[in-house]
Image (tube, rainbow, N blue to C red):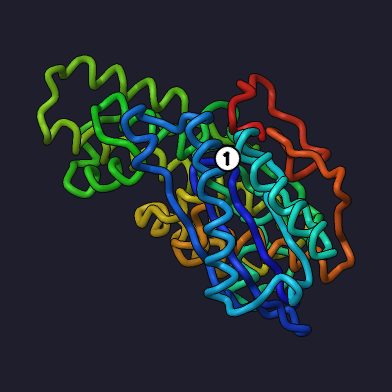
Amino acid sequence: MLVLGIETTCDETAAAVIERQPDGSGKILSNIVYSQTDDHAPYGGVVPEIAARAHIDLLDGIVGRAMKDADVNFAQLSGVAAAAGPGLIGGVIVGLTTAKAIAMVHDTPLVAVNHLEAHALTPRLTTALAFPYCLFLVSGGHTQIVAVLGVGQYVRLGTTVDDAMGEAFDKVAKMLGLPYPGGPQVERAASGGDPKRFAFPRPMLGRPDANFSLSGLKTAVRNEASRLIPLEEQDIADLCASFQAAALESTADRLSVGLKLFEAQFGPSHALVAAGGVASNQAIRGALQAVAAKAQTTLIIPPPALCTDNGAMIAWAGAERLALGLTDTMEAPPRARWLLDADAKAPAGHSKSRAAY
């Protein structure tokens, strides 16, 4: 089957066409992504109104290019998939409305995709991965450990009680005066720093649950940086290195607990899978490899271009659902919030930030 996927939940305007074979394997025929980073950089973060307007201006052209690069026409499509949430509601509306129009005009099935499910299923696009597996979903808005039992079958094992990991990296970058987007800047600065100079806390270390907390660590960085003002370049590098080391040690501990919880409930995981934009961080990849090796499981991380938001992951999630006969009507709503696990409850003290999506 051939599926067109549309992604507009945040600051990437993207469209892609994938082909899913009867044996469940997939092939990316096109994957066009326009990043709005330069549009939002002067503001130090994503401005929802700017993002929505950019999606309106760009999406038709990007869809057209994706179809042309894939060398297919709309009549050949088996379905049209769009990220229907969670995300910035203005952008979600743009992408979902466009998909509905295409589906209606060409009498093609519509799939309203949960953006988080797209991240969860992406590894199956590039790897012959069977269910169940343990997913570490880590991005600017999400930090979760999820048991992926099948398409549409998810159990949250752990989540953040405050900041998401990408959010914490971005906020640390901002307080240290590093340019937007902050996460890659922290990683770059950390490579030249001393991770032992500052003894930052390791949040949640040793707890029996698999939840995360990064707000206190972020505050510790702020307090240390305030003490050192004016900051020298080496101070910034050492602060970033020490922060990253603390975040990684905490993450490794939380994931180890998550894998044990997974095995206790569902048996051995076929793999530890990482997805989301922060999974592109090379230091985090190294830490995850150590966790997987200790747990005697395989680490699977999609290529960096499929970790960040893109149309191929939406198209693939749509294809996975279509293969099971799961489609949506034209009444499918755009959603600012949409839990991956419908039965999940936020942990006590949850801030209801973007991490609660």
Q: Which residue is mark 1?
A: 142
Q: Residue at x 38, y 38 (%)?
A: 39
Residue 105 relative to residue 60: left or right = right
Q: Which residue, as the protein is rendered here, is positioned at the far front?
A: 105
Residue 172 relative to residue 237: left or right = right
What is the x, y in percent for residue 121? 67, 62
What is the x, y in percent for residue 154? 77, 51
In the depicted structure, whether residue 161 falls above or below residue 28: above
Of 104 and 149, the residue lying toward us: 104
Of 324 and 8, the residue lying toward us: 8
In the depicted structure, whether residue 314 falls above or below residue 229: below
Is label 1 in a helix, a strand or a loop? loop
What is the x, y in percent for residue 272? 59, 61
Of 324 and 5, the residue lying toward us: 5
Of 287 and 339, the residue lying toward us: 339
Q: Amino acid at mark 1?
A: His
Q: Residue at x 50, y 37 (%)?
A: 51
The C terminus - image quarter: top right
Whether residue 272 is visible: no
Q: Residue at x 61, y 43 (%)?
A: 144
Residue 218 sits in quarter: top left
What is the x, y in percent for residue 310? 54, 57
In the depicted structure, whether residue 154 falls above or below residue 53: below
